[in-house]
Amino acid sequence: MKWNESASSLLREHYYFGTHKSGLPIYVFPKRMTGTYAILSAKYGSLDHRYRLLGQERDVEIPDGVAHFLEHKLFENEDGSDSFRQFTALGADANAYTTYNRTAYLFSCTEHFSECLAELLNFVFHPYFTDATVKKEQGIIAEEIRMYEDSPWDRADRNLLRAMYQVHPVRKNILGSEASLATITPELLYECHRVFYHPSNMALVVCGDVEREEVAAVADRILADVPRAKQFVRVTEREPDDVGTSCVRTQMQVAKPLFCIGFKDIFVPRDADARLRRDAAMSLLGEMLFSRAEPFYNGLFEEGLLTSSYGFGYSCTDSFGYFGISGEAADPEQIQTRLYEYLDTVRKNGLPEESFLRCRHVLYADEVKAYDSTEEIADRLLCAVFDGVELFSYPSLLQDVTMEELYALMEEIFDPARATLSVIEPFSNEQDERSE
Amino acid sequence: MIKNVIEAGKGMRLRICQTDKFKTGMLSLTLAQPIDREEVWKSTLLLSVLRRGTEKYPTLAALNRRLDCLYGSELGIRSFYCGDAHVLGFSAEILDDAYLIDREESPLEGVLEVMCQMLFHPLLDENGDLLSHYVESEKQLQCDYIRALKNRPRGYAMQRAKELLYQNEPCGASLYGSEEQIMAITKRELTAHWRSLLGRLVPDFFYVGSADGESVKALLEKTVGKELAQKNGSAVFVQDRNAMIRSAERVTRYEETLPVSQGQLILGLRAGVALWDADFYAMAVYNELLGVSPISKLFVNVREKQSLCYSCSSSYHANKGTVFVSCGIENANRDRAEREILRQLDAIAAGDFSEEEFEGAKKSLLNAYRLIEDSPTAIEGYYLGRSLMGVADTVEEARAHVEKVTREQVLSCAARISLDTVYYLRGTLAPKEDGEDEME
């Protein structure tokens, strides 16, 4: 296998990458740690709900929750063994997760790395499903759905996205619903596996005290018989610029109302590098406007209008992006009004240079800290790979962003016309009284 | 990895793990004392007030801006129980000097100065009392916090189960108190509590990072030493090892309701074995076997075979000699889940576990011990907890002990387990058809 190297003098780190002959991109990030972390991921998440095979006329529609269902089921193997068991027998800790745009399988270990990696590649590329195992999983995932349904912060976020977006599949629950799970069959899972789990639609990232040759040797051994890819295109729909609804409310078991105010970003660049720069700039702007050291939060907090449950952040992928501010407040509308007043004041008076420099320091320190964790490194590298950007360019982009850029961004993003307020409010009756 | 205890001036102790493995180290300041039911919630409240403003950094904004300038050194307050100790203090992440962009000042020195400001120089009014605005505001926030515990049904159920199981022990006292207690306290009383704590306790420090012990010690003596009175030495907390309840006399059942869709079932068990007992490592292996790894009895049977839940796991609270099993289920499955969990406890006690499961449990625990060395906060958590409980085992020694655990020891641990408390938080909402809320 031919390896290339990428390095950062600022972070004093480097990694190797290359494409295995099976088509699998492999990344090895050497790190002198006790544990080694490996993550194998398919570029397949809940957003991929419709695709078309090359040469076919018709789109194929996938029921909600299939990517996540597949993630649960891949650990079971044809010979009756369970990969969780194999990992535990090797002293490793294995897990998996599904997001909007990827499904990832991972392990961390402190010994037997090669055997663990072989197990990982083996089970992910060799699916085995039966009616009985599919049925069994439906009850488990139904409880997983209820667990999130009972989490008010999750519900506030989900409702925000469902209100803000009109057609985009980010509206869908990654887990699906009990009704959609009931339609899942082994054939459907096999088909999605054939389409999305080809090495060229995946990546392997390893971070720890390992040699890249060792990783390549395992890949040579296990990936010899991976079938040819089915060529496919993702079918996407055009999301209107306007938000679907500007306010959404739900009653739940909460002490005080929780809110999430989202601003839909309709200018997310198609170009990956431009998107990364926008992400860096938005992170800096968010920190300067909303951090716990700035006047917005402190003003409302000192007045007793916000509690210490508070957060903000920007997320974007190649098909959607938004900025969110969330918190706990007796009167969420008042927070929204004050937010608009604050933004107007900033527009008039500008942002202080002192804050610009200080917030850049904070984000730089956050970035450096991430490089103390093999898990964090591997996850970041994986995201960079799937986004098509260089991992190490982020800290220098942070240094490069200008004040003018931030002002322009502020105008683009914080437009009240593209804002949605999602509120979780307490039940109006007294049904939450404790009964002994 | 080296962990030294260095005696610094005026009774301060510094525990240090000097290493250049991390780009971000950590520093913690700890005050530990026996749990006093009447005082713990006051101390929790006091910490929040101290974090609001100091002589030099009079507002929360000023404090946070100062920490931002020290490369965003996250500084948090903490109030928790470790055995029968109430631990109070601050902890902060610190960017290593090697990664500073401008080398104007050291984040370690800066953070220590902020900690001293908060502990010794909070903002006081003209009468020498803590500021009324901060005290009243934090009282309200602590009440908000207590009410918001129910926002997380799983965490709330676990907390209630603990309160009930420990109701006749010191750690059964709420760290946050009751709304009535909180609203009744005056700024004068809270100020008196602050002065009394300072008079009784000398802070201990824990540092993980690249600076050497002597220079951290010198820094402590320079910044903190001047704040402490000449008389040195508060009493070091000593865990009373006879205070532990070894087995349950009877099973007590509780049920409460909450308007949520999933029920939470918690089983509180007396393990009879604590961190300082000879069988501790065997009990830790038992707990892995029961409900930690994905091949544990609970995961395999309650989740995978019976499809009763998404998560069913156990946790061993070695400082109290208890084990808690928790799972989130449908109300209709409540009895079945309890029977199935109890069946798994019996199965282990009857020796119904394979060599593969036993070895897997040991390996899973060994892996967890090894990974401690990869994280500054895990290193601090491990050694601080052990030192408070008077246990000297290093991570390496702990691993050697785990290697030696035998099947027979695990069986003898299983025989000591007794069921004490069963807590069920019944969800009173019907689950949604498609799991989604109406959009307006």
Image: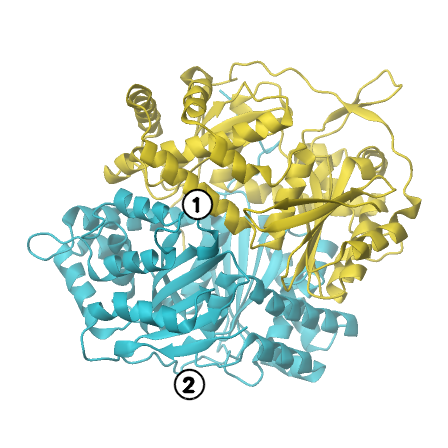
Q: Residue A315 carries which label?
A: none
The residue pinned by badge 1 equals B151
Q: In this image, B324 relative to A138: left or right?
A: left
Q: Tell me, what colour scheme is on the image?
A: by chain
The picture places residue B304, in percent across and down from the top left corner, at 72, 55
Q: In which quarter of the image is the C terminus of chain A?
A: bottom left
Q: Is residue A385 in view?
A: yes
Other-residue count near label 2 (Cα within 10 Å), few / some / many at <14 / 14–19 / ≥20: few
Front residue of this view, candidates A219 and B144: A219
Location of residue A215 by image quarter: bottom right
Q: In this view, does A323 lie above or below A68?
A: above
- Report in which chain the residue with disc 1 lies: B
Q: How many C-alpha atoms fall within 10 Å of the one at disc 1: few (<14), some, or many (≥20)?
A: many
The amino acid type, in three-letter code, at marker 2 is Asn
Picture coordinates of residue B178 (x, y %)?
28, 56
Choose between A206 and A212: the one closer to the eye.
A212
Q: Nearer the viewer, residue B51 or A359?
A: A359
B206, above or below A226, in the image: below
The local secondary structure at tag 1 comes to helix
Chain in yellow?
A
Query: Where is A163 relative to B191, above or below?
Result: above
- Residue picked out by circle 2: B242
The secondary structure type at the circle numbered 2 is: loop
Q: What letter labels the chain drawn in cyan?
A: B
Measured from the top left, where is residue A175 in percent x and y? 65, 37
| Amino acid identity at mark 1 | Asn
Which chain is home to disc 2?
Answer: B
Is residue A247 at least partly visible in the picture?
Answer: no
